[in-house]
Amino acid sequence: MTPPGDYTATRKFGDAAVTIISEGSMSWAPKFVAPEAEWRRAVPEAGADGAFTIGLNLAHIRIGNASILVDPGLDDPDSAWQRRFAARWPGVRRSPGLEHALAALGIRAGEVTHVCITHAHGDHFGGVTLEREGRDVARFPRARHLIGRADWARNPAREDRGSELAGRLGIVEGLGLLDLVDDEREIVPGATIIPAPGETPGHTIVRVHSAGEAFYYVGDLFHLPCEVEHHDWIPAGRDQAAMRASRGRLVADAVPERATLVFTHERFPAWGRIVRDPGGYRWERAW
Ligand SMILES: [Zn+2]
C-alpha cells in the first residue's frame, strides 16, 4: 500500500490548511506556440514526439468551517472510466487516488462543502462523479460545485450527450449543485475563485488569503515551470492573448504577496513561487 505521504502533502497558510493530492502522472506533448529549439532546451526530458511526464495535482483547502476541493481529478484507478482514460492517455500512471487520499486525511465526501472546477478538461473534472454499481453518481452530494460560466453554458460538448461534460457534470447540474461563476467571487471568507481565461474561456483559479499568507491553485494557467519565464509559451489551441493577460494578472498579484502557488501539472508536491529575475520572472520550487 502506498503511504499517504507519497501522494498527499499539507501546509498551513495562516489559519487555512492546504493539502496537495497527486492523482499520479501522465505523458503530454504540449505543442507550444514557441520556437522548438528553445522550448526543448527548457524541457530536455521531452522525447522525439515532444512528450514528457507531467503531474496531476488536486488541492483540498480547509478554511474556517469550509472543506473545499479544487479540481476533483479522475475516477477511481480501477474504474471503467480509468480504462477509457488510459486508452486516450497511454502514459497515465495512477496514485491510489483521491478517494484513498480523502480517507487518509479523515475527510468524508459528504463533508466537502465546495468543489471548484478550474476548467472543463476531463483530467480536471472527470472525478466529479464515480462509477458505483454500473452507474455514475455525484461524488460530493452536499457540495456546491463552481465552474466558470463559459466552460459550461457555452461549451459545445454539452450538446453531445455522450460527452463526459454532459454525462458527468450533467449529473451534478441535474441535482441542482452547479454554480456558474462570472466574476471574482468569495467562496467563504479567505477563499476566492477568480476568472483566468485562456486554457479555456471559463478557466478559473483559487486564492487563499489567511493571516497575511497567500496561496493560489492556478490549474492550467501555467502547466510547466518554463512557462513562468516565458509567458508566451502556450500550447496550441488556447486563446493566446487571453492566457498571456491572465498570466500577467496573476503574477502582478502573487509576486508582491510572496504567495505559494501550485499548478496542476507540476511535479508533486508542486509547491513553488514566482520570483523576479533580471529578465522577468522564473519559477522557484519550494519543496
Ligand atoms: Zn490539465
Image (tube, helix red, strand yellow):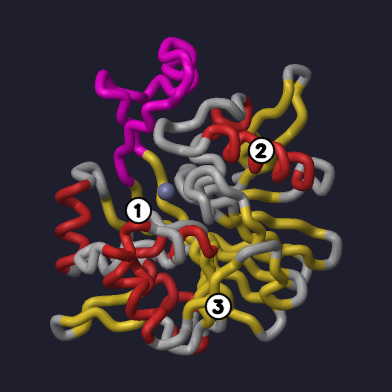
Is ligand 1 less than 8 Å from the beta carbon at label 1? no
Q: CA distance from mark 1 to mark 2?
A: 30 Å
Is ligand 1 less than 8 Å from the beta carbon at label 3? no
Mark 2 is surrounded, within 10 Å at the Cα level, by few (under 14), some (14 to 19) or many (20 or more) other residues, namely some
Q: CA distance from mark 2 to mark 3?
A: 27 Å
Give percent across and percent down for residue 80.
15, 67
Give percent across and percent down for residue 148.
54, 62
Q: CA distance from mark 3 to mark 1?
A: 23 Å
Q: Is residue 50 magenta?
A: yes
Instruction: Identify the residue at horizontal 48%, vertical 78% (top origin).
Output: 178
**Disc 1: which residue:** 24
The furthest residue to the top? 37
Q: Are marks 3 and 1 in contact (CB under 8 Å)?
A: no
* Secondary structure category for the residue under label 1: strand
* Disc on the earlier residue, 3 or 1: 1
Instruction: Identify the residue at horizontal 45%, vertical 23% (top origin).
Output: 33
Q: Is residue 161 magenta?
A: no
**Disc 2: which residue:** 245
* Secondary structure category for the residue under label 2: helix
